Amino acid sequence: MIQQQTILKVTDNSGAKTVKCIKVLNGFNRRVAVLGDTIIVSIQKLRNKARITSKVKKGEVHKAIIIRTKKKIGKKDGTITFFQSNAVSLINKQGKPIASRIIGPVPKIFKKRKKIKFATLSSGFI
């Protein structure tokens, strides 16, 4: 569950390393976001190797989609899934990913929620 002021890792090759959540979208007075939701973020740190070729700059404001959360997710068959860290992937105003790769696995929920582009960019599913 992600809320305002949460520091998140970026798991794509856009050049950003960490971001801070500014606003949770999709609803008036909504306080928390879960897996697959869209949030507005501010870029806090850039990756050292990608500073010159980065697609983003420090301090810029972008939209992001939540890829992984520490919150446990229970499925109908009884299995529980959770990740080690909170992670996002940056998107542009049209909702398409800024990066060309997503590092690490993505939950299978992205196939069902019509976010197939993120599923194809990732290395695998959980």
Image (cartoon, grey):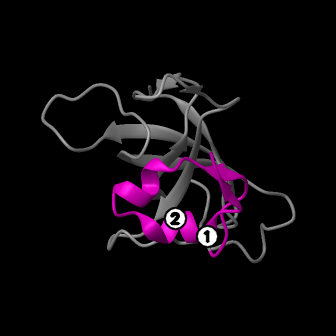
- Residue at horizontal 63 percent and vertical 76 percent from the top: 100
Establish if 124 lies above or below 96.
Answer: above
- The picture quadrant where one finds residue 29 is top left
Quadrant position of the C terminus in the picture: top right
Q: Are marks 2 and 1 in contact (CB under 8 Å)?
A: yes
In this picture, residue 4 sits left or right of residue 48: left
**Is 119 covered by the magenta stretch?**
yes
Tag 1, which secondary structure? helix
Quickly name the residue at label 2.
Answer: 118
Camera-side residue of 3 and 54 = 3
Q: Which residue is mark 1?
A: 121
Q: Residue at x 37, y 56 (%)?
A: 112
At label 1, counting other C-alpha atoms closer than 10 Å, the crowd grade (few under 14, some 14-19, many 20 or more) is some
38 or 16: nearer the eye? 38
Label 2, secondary structure: give it: helix
Residue lying furthest left: 28
Which portion, as a residue range, is magenta?
Answer: 100-126
Give me the C-alpha separation between circle 2 and circle 1: 5 Å
State which quadrant residue 123 falls in: bottom right
Is 123 located above or below residue 30 in the figure? below
Quarter of the image for the N terminus: give it: top left
Amino acid bearing label 2: Phe
Q: 79 or 94: nearer the eye?
A: 79
Decide whether residue 27 is among the magenta residues: no
User: At which x and y percent is residue 20?
Assistant: 52, 39
